[in-house]
Amino acid sequence: MESPDARYASSTEAPPNQSSPRDSPTREGTEKNTHIRFLVSNAEAGSVIGKGGTTISEFQSQTGARIQLSRNHEFFPGTSDRIIMVSGTFDEILRAVDLILSKLLNEFCVEDGEDVDPKSKLRLIVPNSSCGGIIGKGGANIKSFIEDSRAGIKISPLDNNFIGLNDRLVTLTGTLDEQMRAVELIMLKLAEDPHYAQSFSAPFPYAGVSFAVYHGSPSTSVLPSVGTAAAYNAMNYGANGAGVKFQNNKEDRSTSVTIGVADEHIGVVVGRGGKNLMEISQVSGARIKISDRGDFMSGTSDRKVTITGSQRAIRVAEAMISQKVASASDR
């Protein structure tokens, strides 16, 4: 495989079997600073950072790009994945992304065979307002990008489960070379969008995202109003917040339970910017949905909180919610 420096030192010559420069977005203005964001698992984030930050420092030194990651528990809404933002000039970003993806491919991707380039998925984070330019009129742009790069390109719908989330995921599937060509084409198109530059901020701009409405569940229960602290402590949580692992295969089956939480206590369950709810979901492993204002448990003024996951995850989530409510009640 050629080095990233060699691959991106030349600017305008199209690779063999790819469209000509006039059929692709132009490279005008690519010396201006821009950015790109994509998702990585927590383990992959650790690999990019390296021991004592050595890897990320080396990548930044080699490419001239700036590489930032969201913090350990700052995930893209609806996922358990962290965010990498790479910023700099066009070519600096491409070299840095190439280094990052090459490292992750070597460490985390299982090859199908000795003579086959491994395929993987890369999920870019793109503002909803910029996705139209990638799609193009009648899908013309995205079709040409797929033909040029030979990568699979799929744009997710805007996730209505998260109010205030204005980003979508653009998933690129293919070999490293295919993904990198797709990244190049998409970045060139984004460079034409004056609104894209305005989205340049911190790697984790989702503090104001809140969780939306969820209706219906297979079963319901009411959150206990007494003994909540004891219920939480009974889960045998350690100092690091890790729960006990139950050895019971039946408990791994996913189910749903709806509990009632007094309307005035929903705020403490959700937390500022959804922080508490995200923490509960991450620690327990359960998915949690809260009904809209005015959508109460029958005959009560309690909001519906639907918890989905294994029995173990549901118990942990219920106990953590109980503790939040108990703390609010004590105050």
Image (tube, helix red, strand yellow):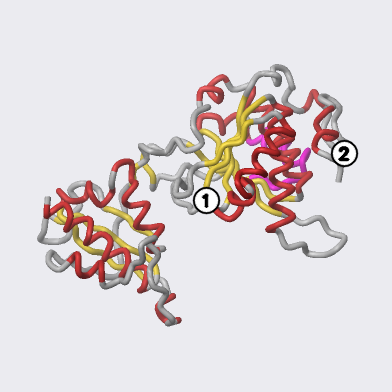
- Helix, strand or loop under label 1: loop
Q: Mark 2 — residue?
A: 17
In reply to whether residue 222 is colored magenta, the answer given is no
In the image, what residue occupies the spot 86% across and 27% down? 13
Tell me if 221 is positioned left or right of 249 in this view: left
Q: Which amino acid does label 2 sit on?
A: Asn
Provide residue 77's location: percent of width, then percent of height: 44, 47
Tell me if 226 is positioned left or right of 160 in this view: left
Tell me if 261 is positioned left or right of 159 in this view: left
Is residue 15 or residue 60 the one in the foreground?
60
> Closer to the camera: disc 1 or disc 2?
1
Q: Mark 1 — residue?
A: 81
In the image, what residue occupies the spot 52% across and 40% down? 168
Provide residue 126's location: percent of width, then percent of height: 55, 36
Residue 137 visible to an observer of this rendering? no
Provide residue 208's location: percent of width, then percent of height: 35, 37
Is residue 185 or residue 73 the one in the foreground?
73
State whether residue 225 is above or below residue 159. below
State whether residue 240 is above or below residue 311. above
Provide residue 305's location: percent of width, then percent of height: 26, 58
Q: Quadrant of residue 249?
A: bottom left
Q: Quadrant of residue 262?
A: bottom left
Residue 132 visible to an observer of this rendering? yes
In the rendered structure, which segment of residues is drawn in magenta?
139-153
Is residue 8 or residue 171 the one in the foreground?
8
